[in-house]
Image (cartoon, rainbow, N blue to C red):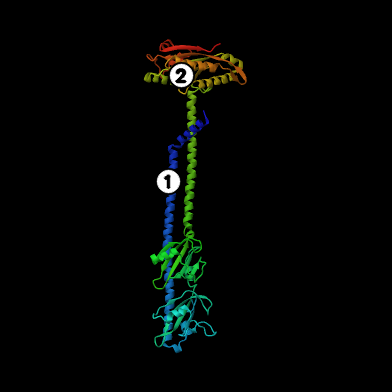
Amino acid sequence: MGTTQIGRRGFEAWLRAALQPATLFGLMTIAACWTAATILISIERGKTLEAAIQQSESLVRLFAENTEQTLLGIDRTLLLLRKGFEDDPDHFDLRNWAERTALIGDLTIQINMVGPDGYLGPTTTNYSGPPLYLGDRKHVRVHVDSGTDELYISEPVLGRVSGRWTIQLSRRIRGPDGGFGGVIIASLDTDFIQKFYDTVDLGSHGNIILRNLDGVVLSARGVFDRGVARQVLPPALRAALARAPAGHIWGNGQIDGTSRLVGYRASKVFPFFATVGRAEGDILATYLQDRNTYLAAAALITILVSIAVAGGTHYKIRLDDVQREIVHVAHHDILTGVANRVLLHDHIDQAFARARRHQEGFAILCLDLDRFKIANDTLGHQAGDLLLRQVAERLRHCIRDVDTVARIGGDEFVVVQANVTGSADVTPLAERILQAVSAPYDVNGNPAVISASIGMRWPRLTEPPRTSSSSMPILPSIVPRLTDATISAFSTSRWSGRH
């Protein structure tokens, strides 16, 4: 049997064992486990992202509202101070009013008044230098020719008096004639959002940013390396603001290479918009832990089930091998491996059945080895057994796949030849067998020569002998001789290899 055939049969045996219900159930369990894990992971990710979006939109709304309240509070104080000055400019004491309103503190670092000539007037700072011209500042110039009375919020500027980055909140002062009477200015520290940032947990890569409508950064906290007074407005955020005044986007890491979920909100009161960014890694940290847990559980179940399936498959293969070996031993001669009497009877029964149904003839060749006893006695029983195995192997090479060779006694063999129409079909086989059996043997280095006598019978299909697998009368009448009743149903020939 070739290596390819052995491999194919081994694979077929493995496949039969693998397709057992227990194996299929195990594979279904593994598939169900991974399906469930995939679904759970997908659900967890969806819930995590949905919760993150809701949290970001809530935080940015609080951030924007907190900033609006801060600016409104400062503006109310500016309006109060302006009214005090306009009512009695000659007796107005800015420091006294600032202390009474408690405006100067952590957020507002100073209040200045600029006269209609553009020079610094009353101030809460300790500036004592030469007259300081501020008329060139945008937060001053914007009020000179303006006919409206609105709070102006500047871009961050580096203070000439304070030397710090501040946002200037300015209001126009009306003169006695109703014309331009100067500007009152509150300087807001650009770090004023620090308090809000400290109250929220945005993770290690989160940030909050306040920009004006041109995209200039007014204030920022968290992971942001561009600083204030820079115009940083990613195209995706600009497009989102054009679609809706509030919402969220997924940033592509343009700021610092970190992908973020960015909630944004434009103020309805002042010309600014706020953003709150949370890094995708921080958002998904808990989800990733859960995902790894699900995957580890699925992998563990897969390993355990695979071990069980492999063990079951191996056991089934071994069991099938044992069963096949039992069947083989029950139907084959232990010494030579050819068919024994049981399998021979079965094949003869099948041959008779085909003969009755399809008129297919067959022949039975009975071999008796000549001079085997001499070789057995001379060389020993072990050598005799080896010689019988060599004879059986030569007989196997003489017949076709549809034929059968069997050992029914010490040195007696039977060959059942299928598809026989007459002696002309049997003679070539008998001659091949005689020639093969009579060729010299090498038995453990010792030469041996034997021969064979062959008696042949084939049934007359007009009167087939009665036989069945349950009562097997045919075999004893063939070897060593047929009974008279059986002979009547067979034609007979005989060959001898004796010299």
- Is residue 198 visible in the rendered structure shown here? no
Mark 1 element type: helix
Q: Are marks 1 and 2 in contact (CB under 8 Å)?
A: no
Residue 113 placement (x, y as % from top left):
47, 83
**In front: 139, or 494?**
139
96, above or below 314, in the image: below
421, above or below 213, in the image: above
Mark 2 element type: strand
Q: Which mark is residue 320?
A: none
Q: Earlier in the sequence, mark 1 or mark 2?
A: 1
Residue 339 placement (x, y as % from top left):
49, 22
Residue 387 placement (x, y as % from top left):
57, 19
298, above or below 354, in the image: below
Few, some or many C-alpha atoms within 10 Å of disc 2 (few <14, some 14-19, many ≥20)? many
Few, some or many C-alpha atoms within 10 Å of disc 1 (few <14, some 14-19, many ≥20)? few
- Residue visible at 40% across and 19% down? 360
Seen as rendered, the residue at the extreme right is 445
- Is residue 487 visible in the rendered structure shown here? yes
Q: Which mark is residue 416?
A: 2
Q: Amino acid at mark 2?
A: Val
| In-image side of 499 versus 73 (left or right) | right
Residue of label 1: 32
Tell me the quarter of the picture where residue 47 sits: bottom left
Q: Amino acid at mark 1?
A: Ala
75, above or below 35, in the image: below
Tell me the quarter of the picture where residue 101 sits: bottom left
- Residue visible at 46% across and 12% down? 493
